[in-house]
Image (spheres, helix red, strand yellow):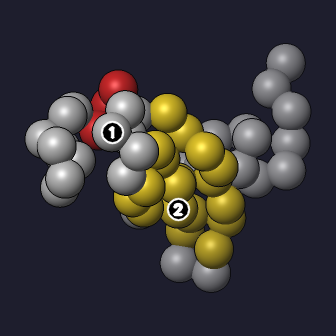
Amino acid sequence: MRCARCGWPAEEARTESAHVTSEGWVRYRRCVCGAVFVERPAGRAPDAANGTRAG
């Protein structure tokens, strides 16, 4: 996935937040150009998004 505004790779965008939803989870990311986009990754939510701590 790439930023729709500048084409920068989404993997290099900073994660602003991640949230569990009724359909899985979403991650809000901010690109280096300032654009914000939402990802709906497949799979299990990371520990920070599901309210538990790693470790």
User: Could you say where residue 9 lies in the image, as x and y percent from the top left?
Assistant: 21, 33
Disc 2 marks a residue whose amino acid type is Val
The vertical placement of 30 against 39, above or below, is: above
In front here: 7 or 27?
Answer: 7
Say which quarter of the image contains residue 24.
bottom right
Q: For this rendering, which residue is in front, 1 or 22?
A: 1
From the top left corner, tell me how far across and down residue 3 is, in percent. Answer: 22, 47
Residue 13 locus on image (x, y percent): 40, 34
User: Badge 2 is on which residue?
Assistant: 26
Q: In the picture provided, is 19 more to the left or to the right than 13?
A: right
Res. 48 in view: yes
First in sequence: mark 2 vs mark 1: 2
Q: Residue at 43% of width from left, 55% of height from top?
A: 36
Give the SS element for disc 2: strand
Q: Residue at x 85, y 18 (%)?
A: 55
Q: Secondary structure at mark 1?
A: loop
Relative horizontal placement of residue 26, taking residue 7 as reference (left or right): right
Q: In the drawing, what numbered circle is on residue 33?
A: 1
Question: Do residues under tags 2 and 1 come within 8 Å of each other at their CB atoms?
Answer: no
Residue 43 visible in this rendered orientation of the protein? no
Residue for point 67% across, 64% down: 20
Disc 2 to disc 1, C-alpha distance: 21 Å
Name the side, left or right, on which 28 lies relative to 50. Answer: left
Residue found farthest to the bottom: 22
Q: Is residue 7 left or right of residue 40?
A: left
Q: How many marks?
A: 2
